[in-house]
Amino acid sequence: MMANFAIHSSPLDALTHALSEQSTKGKGRLEQDFRQAYPILEQHIAKKMRKKILVDQFNAAYKHELNLIQFRKLLKEERARRHADGDATRCQSCGQLLVEADENTSAETTVEDA
């Protein structure tokens, strides 16, 4: 117990340390891991890989227990966040936007039809 007190010289230091540890656990850690894996996940989604396989591989790699519904929710949120930030994922080989590819083709059709 004394060792912990020596590390944290004040209650504020102890609180700061405890909160920083919490940010690397639970939902915060899951979101960080998902953001890190997102570009690779999108590349495999673009290749028509089943999301169930992606969930299983993500869980195995990052030691999480996501189900398919949670995965889809995180995917939707990350797409929206990146779109709002102007940081859409592109294919590494051709450079095409992976998230907005369907939206672009429908927008081009609308412009051509007008």
Image (spheres, grey):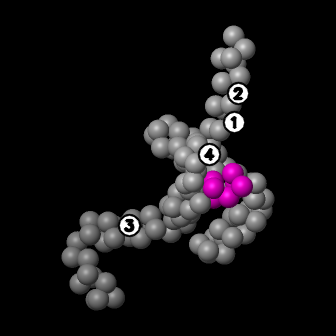
In the picture, the disc for residue 98 is: 4
Label 4 and label 2: CA atoms lie apart by: 14 Å
The single residue placed furthest to the bottom in the displayed view is: 2
Q: Position of residue 85 (x, y in %)?
A: 45, 40
**What residue is disc 2 on?**
106
Indicate whether 96 appears above or below 30: above
Label 1 and label 2: CA atoms lie apart by: 6 Å
The single residue placed furthest to the top in the displayed view is: 114
Please indicate whether residue 84 sits to the left or right of residue 102 in the image.
left
The single residue placed furthest to the front in the displayed view is: 94
Contact (CB < 8 A) between labels 3 and 4? Answer: no
The image quarter in which residue 97 lies: top right
Kindly report the secondary structure that dominates the magenta region of the rendered protein. Answer: helix
- Choose the circle earlier in sequence order: 3 or 1: 3
| Residue at 23% across, 72% down | 10
The amino acid sitting under disc 4 is Leu
**What residue is disc 1 on?**
102
- Choose the circle earlier in sequence order: 3 or 2: 3
Label 3 and label 2: CA atoms lie apart by: 45 Å
Observer able to see residue 3 = yes
